[in-house]
Image: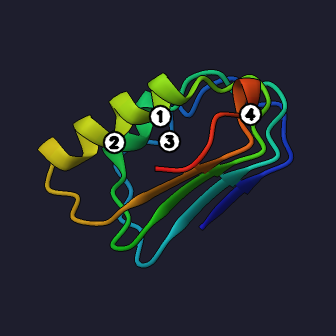
Amino acid sequence: MEISGNGLETLAGLGATSVKGEVRVQYNAELVDVLDVAEFIPTSTIYFIHNKKLWCGNAEMALTLMKANGFLGGMFLDDNLNGCGDL
């Protein structure tokens, strides 16, 4: 699943969705909050790439919530707010 190149500020409202495979959240210029990603858990890796307003701490909190909900995959961060990099 890819969420790319739109005006979203958050991932709120996506609901509990089952995603088979990876999720890529990239090139979303206004995205600042991804905590709601914990509601839909991919079976693989989640990527947050080139989201210029996304603080990596917010993505890291989302990963903690996802793991609490049973997520066994990994997360990759690159070129977000202040160039924050990968985990």
The residue tagged 3 is: 14
Q: Is residue 18 above or below residue 83?
A: below
Decide if residue 59 is in sight here. Answer: yes
Residue 80 position within the rendered picture, expressed as x and y whole percent measured from the top left: 71, 35
Residue 42 position within the rendered picture, expressed as x and y whole percent measured from the top left: 38, 65
- Work out whether mark 2 precedes mark 4 in sequence or the reverse, and give the earlier one: 2
Q: Residue at x 33, y 57 (%)?
A: 41
- Work out whether mark 3 precedes mark 1 in sequence or the reverse, and give the earlier one: 3
Decide if residue 12 is in sight here. Answer: no
The residue tagged 1 is: 59
Residue type at the position of mark 4? Gly
Q: CA distance from mark 3 to mark 2?
A: 17 Å
Q: Residue at x 78, y 52 (%)?
A: 4
**Which mark is in front, 3 or 2?**
2
The residue tagged 2 is: 63
**Which mark is in front, 3 or 1?**
1
Q: Is residue 44 above or below residue 13?
A: below
Mark 4 neighbour density, 10 Å: few (under 14) some (14–19) many (20 or more): some
Q: How many badges with numbers are in the image?
A: 4
Secondary element type, mark 4: helix
Residue that extends furthest to the bottom in the rendered view of this protein: 21
Q: CA distance from mark 4 to mark 1?
A: 14 Å
Q: Residue at x 40, y 34 (%)?
A: 60
Secondary element type, mark 1: helix
Residue 13 position within the rendered picture, expressed as x and y whole percent measured from the top left: 50, 32
Q: Does the residue at mark 2 contact the one at mark 1 (Cβ under 8 Å)?
A: yes
Mark 2 neighbour density, 10 Å: few (under 14) some (14–19) many (20 or more): many
Q: CA distance from mark 2 to mark 4?
A: 19 Å
Residue type at the position of mark 1? Ala
Residue type at the position of mark 3? Leu
The residue tagged 4 is: 83
Please indicate whether residue 22 sits to the left or right of residue 38 in the image: right
